[in-house]
Amino acid sequence: MDEAPRAGFARIFRGPAFTPVSPTEVAVLDDHLFCVDPAGTVARVLAADDPEAVELLAHHRAAGTLTEAAPGQYFLPGFVDLHVHAPQWPQLGRALDRPLGDWLMNYTFPLEARYADPVFARQVYTQLVENLLRQGTTTAMYFATVHTQASVVLAEICADRGQRALVGKVTMDDRSSNPDFYWDADTASALDGVVEFIERVHGLGSGGLVLPVVTPRFIPSCTDRALAGLGEIAARYGVHVQSHCSESDWEHQCAFDRYGRSDAESLDGFGLLTGRSVMAHCVHLSDRDAELFARSGTAIAHCPVSNAFFADAVLPLRRRLDEGLEIGLGTDISGGFAPSVRTALREALVQSRTLDHGADPGRPAPERGTHDGHIVLEEAFWLATAGGGEALSLPIGRLAQGYAWDAQLVDTTAAGGLPLFDVRDSRDVLDAILLVSGAEHIAGVWVAGRRVIGD
Amino acid sequence: MDEAPRAGFARIFRGPAFTPVSPTEVAVLDDHLFCVDPAGTVARVLAADDPEAVELLAHHRAAGTLTEAAPGQYFLPGFVDLHVHAPQWPQLGRALDRPLGDWLMNYTFPLEARYADPVFARQVYTQLVENLLRQGTTTAMYFATVHTQASVVLAEICADRGQRALVGKVTMDDRSSNPDFYWDADTASALDGVVEFIERVHGLGSGGLVLPVVTPRFIPSCTDRALAGLGEIAARYGVHVQSHCSESDWEHQCAFDRYGRSDAESLDGFGLLTGRSVMAHCVHLSDRDAELFARSGTAIAHCPVSNAFFADAVLPLRRRLDEGLEIGLGTDISGGFAPSVRTALREALVQSRTLDHGADPGRPAPERGTHDGHIVLEEAFWLATAGGGEALSLPIGRLAQGYAWDAQLVDTTAAGGLPLFDVRDSRDVLDAILLVSGAEHIAGVWVAGRRVIGD
């Protein structure tokens, strides 16, 4: 008898599961085994009635390395949150009625300036990471602040707590466009700080769990020299890049005024649109900008909640998906008030329909909306999981062979139970999990095979 | 010493509180006493540093009739949900991607037909009422089904469990527009059933906690004879009326095709727009319809989540508020996927902004939206509480003298705590409660002074 495959699995997870297999298709796996290797990767998926499964179950049950879903529990991929301003956690939900300038200058920037204090940073970031894990967010892409030390603290907390994370020390060195209490004092030291940050994150020994990200806040807050320098650093280290792109009418126009070309073209000119780039919002991309995104492999972090407050319009999600762009979801803490990718998923559905049918009942129906279609629930699930994984070029967001076991176990019987009286098939259960469940229904969360939430 | 006022209070609630005082103004009461009489009405509100407060506190503490907020806890009015299809609870979140006809004929109507069985009704409605109370919904306006017995069961459960409720047995007697497995078999017995239902609810002895509502499903599902009969019954018994009005382009057009006038005008012609009428959706009202609403005292149940799926447009909320219409919020279970008025509040904010700035980034900004303004958080709070109370002409939705003690106690430290690191004033706390908190932060709920959730 060949013992090797069994001995090769560190743990087996057994239960029903939902996983995206394409942007429009969900696999409903009714009773399956997910065999995870010591590196935390799914090495094998097989149905529980496969003859081999019986043996594997016996072996791992005896060894205490079997995790079984209880009745009413379902495995899903963990959520991928592509856009989080970590330092803004203390003001989540606050002051969103204020105009952007007021919100930035009187709330956001004074708060971000406080992360000069690494003790404050550790206190906030510890709570943030804990909260996002409880929400089922197994991967988060973070903007930190300009402060190297506090940014490293965030990376350390993610590594210690076991959240997969992409962390960026923010660059904002243009003296004319940043507040005098919060900016990079000079360009050379800003770039040196980014290099130092990348090397310190690489030195954490997180086994690739936490990755550094080159992070110009956005074009309007950076000098050309900084933008060019960041493009070079990104190429030299092969790291991810994140920024904001064409979020609002104002931001979209800024690049035209400064460079005579679009925000996307300008970022590309600085070497900042790569296969590892994720740009937040992108509501106002032209179709030509979208082609540039597709060609360069740049992904969109779609942040529907904050877009309602700051973007002046709705992302044409149906169109961008049809163009084959890589797209995932972002909470945009704290431009968005909701810490959960679940809420972003729901709001993406709602806004996609609103764009399609239109908003103003004072216009006749044919002139009201774009009438070019909306996304469906399968696609929203994709965006929240596998779409985020593809955006990051990481093997995450699916429960499938070769992917990391970054997973959540949803208990439909918890917290009074989801209303599932009349279930015809498992797809009904998925509808309720995606649209109705909350963090209180999460019974367990794993990242790279390690349990990070639950007993 | 005059003992009468103290003896007259059944219980005193002490703590900080937030309550709307007008559509645009919130009172922040930092440490106050709310003195509730034996009928469950707030008889007196006074600051804790009022000399009389000391005596009252001592008296009620000794008597064990003092409830004090712990640090981090705040009293708010309970939520008022103006539009709930109670029988649809088992399919919450399900099949919303389906077109309306499919959703009704293959999901909703077959499910509603099952309430011919009062045992099934009791099972579902018990869970529904429990869940809504946990969400902080102290008052709900319910559509039940055509079944008299099952509708009475819902009223009984609300009375027993202590939820303030307005319950309607649904009328849908037009043979041509309803499915053959679910409709009122004939008009006369449908109307008799409504009268029987009203009298049985009046006979429950709930002390006014549960009220019957005349409930034509909507014009397209009723005969003229039924609509006229319902108008007469509403007048004869002086009860509330609820229905749907101009929800979608299709529904808005139906009345023109049938009567040559609008849905609102048609409802009015049958005597169904009264000071106690609440109409769901109303997205496509003309300005003349809105004047009719204002004149008759008819209220709008704004259901932003379900509107995204079924209404073809966004309610012009800013305009309707400025016209002085009575407006509250509805979850529209299960046309909406969220059981909480909190979600409706947030979605009302989001959609109001979307209508204002517009959705399609392909249009120039000036042509994109209505640019006539959006609501702010204070108004969203009003809609979820006092606005709902005014819509129902009931003394609820405020923590103020003469109003019922229908209240929720929100614990900002529960479930890991709301992110409140940096609070400048209590208004910051209210922002986080309204935009970030969930049912898991509710430490207690009271209706008419009776504790219905919590120890």
Image: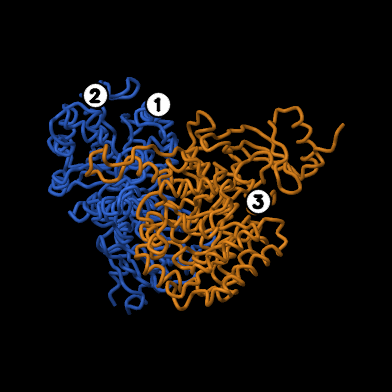
Chain colours: A orange, B blue
Q: What is the spatial separation of the Cα atoms under label 3 and label 2, in whole angstroms?
A: 56 Å
Q: Depth check: B148 or B287 in front?
A: B287
Mark 3 lies on a secondary structure that is: strand
Q: Position of residue B293 (x, y in %)?
A: 16, 46
The residue singled out by tag 1 in the image is: B106
Same subunit under labels 1 and 3? no
Disc 1 residue type (three-letter):
Asn
Up/down of B48 relative to B111, above or below:
below
The residue singled out by tag 3 in the image is: A447
Disc 3 residue type (three-letter):
Val
Mark 2 lies on a secondary structure that is: loop
Disc 2 residue type (three-letter):
Asp
Q: Depth check: B319 or A235 in front?
A: A235
Q: What is the spatial separation of the Cα atoms under label 1 and label 3, in whole angstroms?
A: 40 Å
Q: Nearer the viewer, mark 3 or mark 2?
A: 3
- Answer with left or right where residue B81 lies relative to residue A65: left
- Quadrant containing the N terminus of chain B is bottom left
The mark that comes first in sequence, 2 or 1, is 1
Is any part of residue A58 visible from this angle?
A: yes
Mark 1 lies on a secondary structure that is: helix
Q: Nearer the viewer, mark 1 or mark 3?
A: 3
